Image: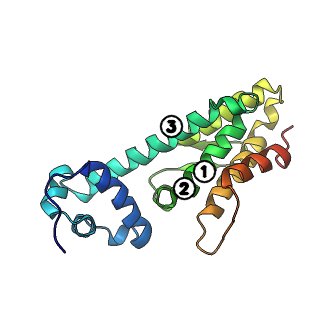
Amino acid sequence: MKEKPYHHGNLQTELIEEGLALIHEEGRGNFSLRKLAKRLGVSPTACYNHYPTVDELLAEMKRYVKKKFSDALIAGVTDEMYSDYPMLGMGKAYVNFFAENPHYFTFVYDSDDYRITLTEHSFEGDFEPFHIFKDAAVQCMKEAQIEEANFHDNLVAMWAATHGLAAMANMKGFHYDGDWGQLAVKLLLTKVTLC
């Protein structure tokens, strides 16, 4: 394979995006900077100049995906189309984000880099997009004057519906010929009853 010139386009972003795709295809255990360099048609040195170790690249991938996911959720919450029901916009954004980027879903949820814990009385996590989701949901429930005692179960129901659709969109043997985001809006609006 002929190597591409040393400098081409935005190699840092290409390393991240192609690295995420490679992990999605082969798993983290089979990931290496050399494999990534070969996939991109660049020298291993070009990769090592940006990320001297696999761990540094993985850490940057984590930041990259977390920021893109957070930005998508915030855009969904603030979408004027759903100004009366911001959770619909966020649910749509959540599902579309992962339906359009399955390699992100695998990277985030097939690792133990983040922790989300559900108990009978709490639903907590150390993942920024989870906090955005939870904070927006709580704010919507307050504005809808839902009793605080119901927040926990309502939040679990919203998360389960939204995350469940995103997971379905990433199942290899599952096919849906419609719009995943619109399905999320429809189900959140008509099937997830908050009280």
Q: Which residue is mark 1?
A: 96
Q: Is residue 44 above or below residue 17?
A: below
The residue carrying pointer 3 sits among few (fewer than 14), some (14 to 19) or many (20 or more) residues within 10 Å by Cα, namely: some
Mark 3, mark 2: which one is toward the viewer?
2
Q: Secondary structure at mark 2?
A: helix
**Image x and y of residue 59, in percent:** 33, 50
Picture coordinates of residue 109 (x, y %)? 52, 58
Q: Residue at x 61, y 44 (%)?
A: 93
19 over 27 or under it: above or below: above
- Within 10 angstroms of label 2, few (less than 14), some, or many (20 or more) residues? some
Q: Residue at x 60, y 51 (%)?
A: 96
Distance from label 3 to label 2 (Cα)? 15 Å
The picture places residue 70, in percent across and down from the top left corner, at: 51, 39
Label for residue 100?
2
Residue occupying the point 62% across, 37% down: 76
Task: Give the mark nearest the N terminus, 3 or 2.
Answer: 3
Residue type at mark 1: give it: Asn
SS under mark 3: helix
Amino acid tagged 3: Asp
